[in-house]
Amino acid sequence: MIDLLLQYGLFLAKVVTIVIAALFIIVTVANVGERRRHHDEDGDIEVMRLNERFEHFANTLRMAVLDKEALKAHDKQEKEKQKKAAKKDEVTTKKHIYVINFNGDIRASATENLRQEITAILTIANKETDEVVINLESPGGMVHGYGLAASQLARIREHGLPLTICVDKVAASGGYMMACLANTIIAAPFAVVGSIGVVAQLPNFHRLLDKWDIDYEVLTAGEFKRTLTVFGENTEAGRQKFIADLESTHTLFKDFVQSYRPHLDIAQVATGEHWYGKQALDLGLVDRLQTSDEYLFAASKEADIFAVRFIHKQNFMQKVGLTASATVDSLLVKWWERLTQKPHF
């Protein structure tokens, strides 16, 4: 029985070793491709006119529902409308709305695309007539990541362009830090909004190591270079310093939100709590209850709407490598980041 267990253990160790080696190779290839991609800025902007998408949906249903006579009458009406619109466009310029989708993870990694998309829009947008809409979904994450993402949105405000942010599901913590930059925040009735707070958590294995007589040393130069550790023995002084740092970050967060939404009772909403859309509206965290679909569909009656997306060009190996890298990242890296002492919005 013991021999069988030993053989099984050896086999399992070999399998784990092979899997780790394979993942290491794939991730290495992915990282090389990623560095090359960022170095060459190998990508381009993709633009889709959403008005045409809405029109396509309507035409598809219309052809299925209406009879020939009704379709003929509709086509005649549309041609007359287009003639009138063409004459009107000779006098006035039609409003343009530029739409960006931001799906945030713990590191706000979508910021890399966001910065390119905003740059592209700023090269052409007219602050007198145009608007930028961000479809935002994020539960928050790393402070520096979402700080940079918010700074990208600030570029839109600095150029004088109206900024509307739509929240269909969640804009919490770092996500709300981004949302508060909008001139208008629109949220679905049950979207999760708020969570203006800072959190950090990490395990400590010191007592376990001490039980097995295993020493773990942390060497620093500077009293608070390392406040809390995973394996070392944490001190009360280090713990208090860490809490003070969290409070300082929270103060920065509150001041940032207050500067863009001065009407907020910041003491009431900056408790780390989150609220649903209707509650958030009552508290002043959002300005209107509506889904992004309804907002854009209604706006398409008077404006040309363009979805803007930055697309990275990748060869086959880069696609495979990045997919594997993302899988490993979701299983290992994100778990570790949540356990370390880095503060999170």
Image (spheres, rainbow, N blue to C red):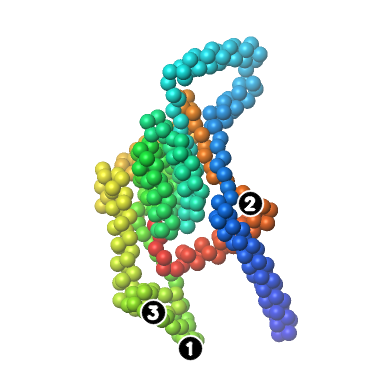
Q: Position of residue 239 (x, y in %)?
A: 33, 73
Q: Position of residue 316 (x, y in %)?
A: 68, 53
Identify the residue shown where x is 39% and y is 45%. 155
* Closest to the observer, 24 or 41: 41
Q: Which residue has dot 1 on it?
A: 213
Instruction: Check residue 60 in the rendering and tell me which mark sits there, or answer none.
Output: none
* Closest to the observer, 88 or 230: 88
Q: Closer to the camera: disc 2 or disc 1?
A: 2
Mark 2, other Cα within 10 Å: few <14 / some 14–19 / many ≥20: some
Question: At numbered mark 3, what does the secondary structure look like: helix, strand or loop?
Answer: loop
Q: Does 139 appear above or below 294?
A: below
Identify the residue shown where x is 55% and y is 55%. 38
Quarter of the rendering occupied by the N terminus: bottom right
Q: Which residue has dot 3 on it?
A: 220
Identified by mark 1, the residue type is Asp
Instruction: Check residue 314 in the rendering and tell me which mark sits there, or answer none.
Output: 2
Mark 1, other Cα within 10 Å: few <14 / some 14–19 / many ≥20: few
Mark 3, other Cα within 10 Å: few <14 / some 14–19 / many ≥20: few
CA distance separating discs 3 and 1? 22 Å
